[in-house]
């Protein structure tokens, strides 16, 4: 989960808990979710053939088919008495990696949505919970433009070498895409919050960690795979991992730990010290950037164990749920 901007970082993380436990004014929580379609799957198998040649496994390219999580969720904590907004939390499953030019420091599309939220609710902390988007990126459509013969030849060579490539986009293309997402988000938050307003009375947290070598053989950094479970009342729970999981993990974890009826579950990545990408068993066998190509950038050298990775991660998440239940029983 990403940090909010200054000057909110020192206080926003403490506010929800203190409000829920009665040390400050009680709060109501309103949540709104809608589906949009501005993302695309980027994973490509290492053994995919182009023509008669088989190329390397460290390629990122377009894969139109595949699961995506297109739901955008917005949660606003307000005081009960005067309905004053306190904190906005929003969740979306997409890499913020399409800003143009690529060599600048930018808040990318979360910054565009944050600007919209603050325009509507005032200068409040805005926390972005990024979903399991290890293989999901923005689907930016470039405006029509003429390309030279040299550019067309270079692109043809790239397609032969790496498969279907992402289109070349301009700064104007990215701005148009990010604004369209922010406008769609604005349409979601404009809906009547009364229909989904709740007054949660509990905040429960569970935690668990496992060594990376439970599912990876080779050299690894001094980090763990950690899981956190955050439950706010009976209506909302957030499952967080200290990795960059691919979107398929949402289905795997839903099957392993079924969602409670009528409870919204959000999956968020990038908890604490992220060790790297987290592929599924099937993706380990396929290879690709999210399996092998990223490793030198994150200090790993070796291989994921396809038969061990899913049982290990599921066990870690279940242990976090168990830890939360033990804490609830202890304080009951």
Image (cartoon, rainbow, N blue to C red):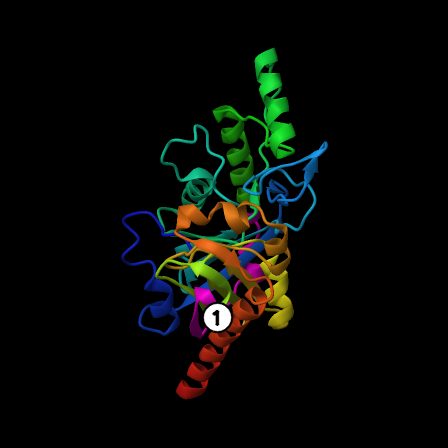
- Give the image quarter of residue 38: top right
In terms of depth relative to the viewer, which is nearer, 212 or 83? Answer: 212
- What residue do we see at 60% from left, 23% from top? 155
Left or right: 86 in relation to 70: left
195 and 230: which is toward the camera? 230
Q: Is residue 17 visible?
A: yes
Residue behind mark 1: 231
Is residue 66 positioned above or below 19 on the image?
above
| Residue 296 picture location, percent across and down | 42, 47
Quadrant of the drawing holding the C terminus: bottom left
Give the image location of residue 278, x and y in percent: 52, 56
Quadrant that contains the N terminus: bottom left
User: Of residues 25 and 323, which is closer to you in this image?
Assistant: 323
Above-or-below relation of 23 to 57:
below
The answer to whether one can see residue 258 in this image is no
Tell me which residue sits at (58%, 33%) in the image.
140
Tell me which corner region of the image, top left, top right, bottom left or bottom right, holds residue 195. Answer: bottom right
- The residue positioned 55% from the left and 64% from the top of the image is 309
Q: Position of residue 317 (x, y in %)?
A: 51, 70
Residue 163 in the image: above or below residue 242 = above
In magenta stretch: residue 205: yes
Looking at the rendered structure, the number of numbered marks drawn on it comes to 1
Magenta segment boundaries in residue numbering: 188-213
Which residue is rendered at x = 41% and y = 66% of the image? 27
The percent coordinates of residue 98 (x first, y second) are: 49, 35
- Tag 1's secondary structure? strand
Residue 132 counted in the magenta span: no
**Neighbour tally class for label 1: few under 14, some 14-19, many 20 plus, Cα within 10 Å:** many
């Amino acid at each position: 989960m990403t940090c909010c901007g200054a000057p909110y970082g020192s206080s926003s993380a403490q506010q929800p808990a203190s409000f829920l436990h009665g040390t400050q004014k009680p709060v109501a929580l309103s949540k709104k979710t809608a589906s949009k379609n501005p993302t695309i799957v980027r994973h490509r198998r290492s053994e995919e053939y182009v023509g008669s040649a088989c190329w390397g496994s460290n390629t990122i390219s377009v894969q139109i088919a595949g699961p995506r999580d297109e739901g955008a969720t917005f949660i606003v904590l307000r005081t009960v008495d005067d309905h004053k907004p306190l904190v906005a939390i929003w969740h979306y499953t997409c890499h913020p990696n399409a800003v143009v030019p690529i060599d600048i420091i930018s808040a990318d599309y979360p910054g565009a949505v944050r600007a919209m939220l603050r325009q509507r609710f005032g200068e409040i902390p805005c926390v972005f919970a990024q979903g399991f988007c290890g293989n999901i990126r923005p689907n930016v459509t470039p405006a029509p433009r003429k390309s030279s013969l040299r550019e067309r030849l270079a692109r043809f060579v790239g397609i032969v070498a790496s498969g279907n490539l992402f289109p070349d986009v301009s700064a104007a293309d990215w701005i148009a895409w990010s604004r369209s997402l922010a406008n769609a988000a604005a349409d979601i938050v404009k809906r009547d919050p009364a229909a989904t307003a709740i007054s949660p009375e509990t905040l429960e947290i569970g935690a668990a960690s496992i060594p990376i070598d439970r599912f990876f053989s080779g050299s690894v950094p001094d980090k763990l795979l950690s899981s956190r479970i955050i439950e706010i009342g009976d209506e909302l729970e957030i499952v967080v991992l200290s990795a960059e999981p691919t979107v398929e993990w949402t289905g795997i974890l839903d099957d392993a730990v079924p969602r409670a009826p009528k409870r919204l579950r959000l999956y968020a990545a990038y908890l604490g010290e992220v060790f790297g990408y987290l592929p599924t068993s099937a993706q380990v066998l396929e290879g690709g950037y999210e399996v092998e190509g990223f490793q030198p950038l994150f200090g790993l050298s070796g291989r994921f164990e396809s038969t061990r990775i899913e049982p290990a991660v599921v066990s870690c998440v279940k242990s976090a749920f168990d830890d939360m239940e033990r804490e609830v029983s202890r304080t009951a």
